[in-house]
Amino acid sequence: MENRKDQQKNRRPYGKQSRPLRETYGNRDRRPETPREESEVGNGAVIGRNAVRELLRSGRAVDKLLVQSGEREGALVPLVGEAIARGIPVVETEKRKMDGIAGHAPHQGIIAMAAEKEYASIDEILEIAAARGEKPLIVVADGIADPYNLGAVIRCAEGCGAHGLIIPKRHAAGLSPVVTKASAGAIEHLAIAKVPNIAAAIETLKEKGLWIYAAEAGGADFRETDMGGAVAIVLGSEGAGVSELVRKKSDFVVSIPMYGKVNSFNVSTAAAVLLCEAARQQRKA
């Protein structure tokens, strides 16, 4: 009887036995299945010192920098200096106004008003993996509603070397200032696709040669699961988890063993555990 790894290779292999890279991951001359969209990150505000620092490093256009009145000192000095060097207007602003712009999320006395952030397509995310010479590692957020959780997931994904994140257009957190803040600047370095339907996006990923792993209770132990190929990890909403339809479309269901009295981790904690293991296996394979 074939073991799990052999079964996976026979079903949809990745690597030398798979389809040519351009065929598998999309031809650049063809129109991407998911059209590129553009959207502001919330109201265009990037809040907090780490997020602003990463925004300035990214080279993305910044309209102006808001600094809380009386706070142009300490850790803010190099950020203000970099903004001035780049010709970005620096405006001293009252705390009450900054609180409103930030949606009352902690802004640490600094907010950058950024230009629009472009969404990537699924094909563009896969092209990033191809350009790096790496097996694709993608996170699919199936209805994560809390912006702090989504920001933390983005930070975990980027830190583990993931090539992109897929989020739905509706019934989930969007890229708000709170998400940007919670990502601690990682959002500037991770490609994000926004799709009308997560189940359809998973079908597209499967057609491109990726294996789909839904993170849910009652699945196989992630430590005993082969995640060394081209992988997409699906993380569900805080309450309902991965939707039934998405779970059925996934190739595997994986779980993290729990030894305490609580029966699950926060979604961003689960993301860190699973992505670290997938990244380890990919680099070992």
Image (cartoon, helix red, strand yellow):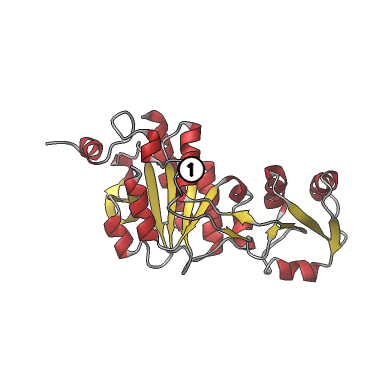
| Residue 282 position in % (x across, y down) | 39, 34
Left or right: where 238 falls relative to 155: left
Picture residue at 28% right of the left edge, 50% below the top: 252
Picture residue at 24% right of the left edge, 40% below the top: 8
Identified by mark 1, the residue type is Ala
Nearest the viewer among 106 and 226 is 226
Q: Which residue is mark 1?
A: 162
| Residue 12 position in % (x across, y down) | 27, 40
Picture residue at 48% right of the left edge, 40% below the top: 127
Of all residues, the one furthest to the left in this rendering is: 1
Picture residue at 61% right of the left edge, 63% below the top: 176
Nearest the viewer among 268 and 145 is 145
Left or right: where 205 falls relative to 92: left
Left or right: where 8 falls relative to 154: left
Image: 118 above or below 16:
below
| Residue 234 position in % (x across, y down) | 39, 54
